[in-house]
Amino acid sequence: MAFGFFDRIKDGLEKTRKSFVKNVESIVIGYAQIDDDFLDDLEAVMLTSDLGPKTTEYLMKEIRRGVTEGVINNTGDVMPFMEDRITEMLVDQEDEIILHHPEVILVVGVNGVGKTTTIAKLANYYTKEGKKVIIAAGDTFRAAAADQLSIWADRVGVPIVKHKEGADPAAVVYDAMEAAKARNADLVIVDTAGRLHTKVNL
C-alpha cells in the first residue's frame, strides 16, 4: 500500500512537470522575440505552475541576465537555459541538505483533501522502514480531529501527542518534539487544521 501511495505522488509530480514544460513551450512558440510581454507571460506560467515565488524570482533574474549578456538570443534559447539553471539549483540543494533529528513532516492543506489518511499512510510506511515515528495532533480546531487521528495511530502502532479540543496547536507540536527527543524518535508527523480562505484565524 505504501509503495502505491508514493507511486501516485511520483505520477502526480510527473504530470505537473509535463504540464509546466508544455505551458513554457506554448509561451516560447507564441512569441517571435524576447520582450516585456514574453517575460511577463513566462513569469505567470512559473507562478501558476506552483514553482514558487522565490524560485520564479531567481529564474526570471537569471533569464534577464542571460538576455543582457547575450547567452539567450531568442525565445528558443529560454527552455535549455532554464533547464540548466534548475539542474544547478537541484544539485546545489542536494549538496547542502542537512538532516535534522528528529525529522519533521508538517501536513497542511484545505479541508477534506485527505491529510489524516495521508499521515496514517506515512506513519505506516516509515514504521515498516524501521523508523520510530510520533504523530502530533495539531488540528485542535476541527471537532474530534484528534480522536480520528488517534484511531489511525493505534492501527498503525505509533504514539500520538494530543491536547484537548481548542488547545494551542503550537503547544501540541512543542510537546511532540519534546517527546520525540526523549524517546529518540526519527520522525514527527504533524497534523494541522484544514485551511480555507474564509478561515482568517487559521
Image (cartoon, rainbow, N blue to C red):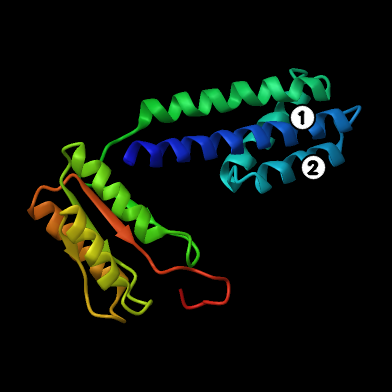
Q: What residue type is disc 1 on?
A: Glu
Dot 2 or dot 1, earlier in sequence? 1
> Residue at position x 39%, y 42% from top?
5
Query: Residue 50 in the image: x percent, y percent?
Result: 60, 46
70 vs 165: above or below: above
Q: Which label number is shown at residue 41?
A: 2
Which quadrant would residue 192 be assigned to in this image? bottom left
Dot 1 corresponds to which residue? 25
Which quadrant would residue 24 be assigned to in this image? top right
Quadrant the N terminus occupies: top left
Q: Nearer the viewer, mark 2 or mark 1?
A: 1
Give SS at disc 2: helix
> Residue at position x 45%, y 68% from top?
194
> Residue at position x 23%, y 80% from top?
164
Confirm whether residue 134 shows in the render.
yes
105 vs 23: above or below: below
Query: Residue 191 in the image: x percent, y percent?
Result: 33, 62
Q: What residue type is disc 2 on?
A: Asp
Query: Residue 123 in the image: x percent, y percent?
Result: 25, 49
Query: Residue 172 in the image: x percent, y percent?
Result: 24, 68
Is residue 92 left or right of 166 when viewed as pictured?
A: right
